[in-house]
Amino acid sequence: MASRLRIKGGKKLSGKINVGGAKNAVVAIIPAAILAGDICTLENVPQLLDVLNFQKILQSLGAEAEFIEENTLRINPNTINTYDATAPIMSEFRASYYVLGSLLARFNKAKALLPGGCNIGLRPIDQHIKGFEALGATVDINHGVISVEAKNGLKGNTIYLDIVSVGATINIMLAAAGAEGVTVIENAAREPEIVDVANFLTGIGARVRGAGTGTIRVTGTPHRIGVTHPVIPDRIEAGTWLALAAANNSDITVENVIPVHLDAVIAKLKEMGAHVEEGEDYVRIVSNGNLKAVDLKTFPYPGLATDMQSQMMIPLIRAEGVSTIIENIYNNRFKVVNELSKMGIKVKVDNNIAVVEGPQKLSGAIVRATDLRCSAALVIAGLCAEGETIMEHVYHLDRGYEKAVEKLQAVGADIIREEVQI
Ligand code: EPU
């Protein structure tokens, strides 16, 4: 059996959507709990596929990891008894590589399968490796297994990242929390998820300064404790619903958000002509459908997130005029364009540039999600299209959007999930 979505487009949506915890923060904080000194209680944890995978990985290492409430995960790292994380599930998603930094900090040794994840272009981990080596570890890759070992323990060092990388910044922070002395990460990524991981590490006893800027200082400690930590809201989930409302002439309020994390998306939606109102923890968007073309460029935070690029394409398809999208992070993140062509849409792509001439009409079709954000864009497209859209490969959506169908139904969307024989 496989899931697919049946979407009937054309309905204006209205209402409030409660945004869940940030996927890309929680998939780093769960493995960070490996190096905590005692029980950690993580709140606002979305029950996403990657989170459930991580729960299994922690259990395979010997940890107790159970949801004690729907969105509260309790982890007891005291029972972890191995540094071997080569369970097959490791290669099913990207963030599994965070066990390397955490196990290294705890045992001075780690063994893991190389990560999988969305197929959106080249995704090397050379900067992670460079960081581990700078802290005194040797790294060996053989038959898809990466082994890292610091025979004489980890020692703080200064590491300049050649490329701004979320994953490398976090993985080095994790290892550095167990290292002797001070580690300085230069040209660090500044994403809010990094600040959340830094707050967690501070909570368990490490000293982290500068997270959210380009220079992060981590002072490791062997005296680590447990902590209760609420995960920050998911800015990409929130941005996705804002892009939906803009494209679909709707009135949607996203709640439980940190509006400043959405600055780049909000600025672009306003530039397109949508009306946006920001409160302390909510953002309301009202769109009357008169959208103007704009140009978008993806950048590391605080620039416009590459994770919002596919979704933003849909309001641009509905907007009047010629828009360009420049993708600066990944070299193959326009796969959604192929699927959109099945809905009658023409977008010209040349390497990392897409040109959208609008407005164009979307017509319902059978489409197939190729990655997480592509799936979100196709849902938006389906909700804006004339007629019925069927989206296959829903598992991509399930990796990043908790209860998406239920949330969309609650604001009036005609969308159902059905199980079909394959
Ligand atoms: N890069 C290298 N070497 C490295 C690491 C990265 O060349 O050692 C390159 C990548 O190939 C890419 C750029 O650096 O071109 C940025 O990659 P980054 O390391 O920042 O990405 P990531 O940590 O693998 C996280 C998110 C992605 C998000 C990016 C960029 C997680 C689990 N994933 O990936 O999220 O697109 O940062 O913001 O945090 C998604 O949620 O849909 C998603 C793909």
Image (cartoon, rainbow, N blue to C red):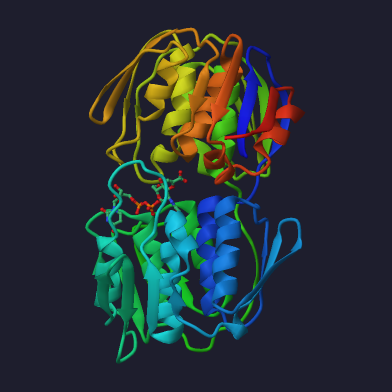
- Locate residue 159, reporting x and y percent: 26, 69
Q: 189 or 135: which is nearer to us?
A: 135
State left or right for residue 30 relative to residue 307. right
As displayed, is residue 194 above or below residue 371? below
**Residue positioned 26% across, 31% down in the render:** 352
Q: Position of residue 137 (x, y in %)?
A: 28, 80
Q: Is residue 316 above or below residue 238?
A: above
Q: Which image quarter holds the N terminus?
A: top right
Q: Position of residue 213 (x, y in %)?
A: 38, 57
Q: Residue furthest front?
A: 422
In which quadrant is the C terminus drawn? top right
Q: How many marks?
A: 0
Residue 97 left/right relative to 363: left
The residue closer to the viewer here, 24 or 185, is 24
Q: Can you tell which quarter of the image residue 246 is in?
A: top right
Would you say residue 133 is visible in this rendering?
Answer: yes
67 and 112: which one is in front? 112
Give the residue at the far bottom of this rendering.
152
Q: Quadrant of residue 285?
A: top right
Tell me residue 116's x, y (percent). 40, 54
What residue is rendered at 64% in x and 12% in y? 10
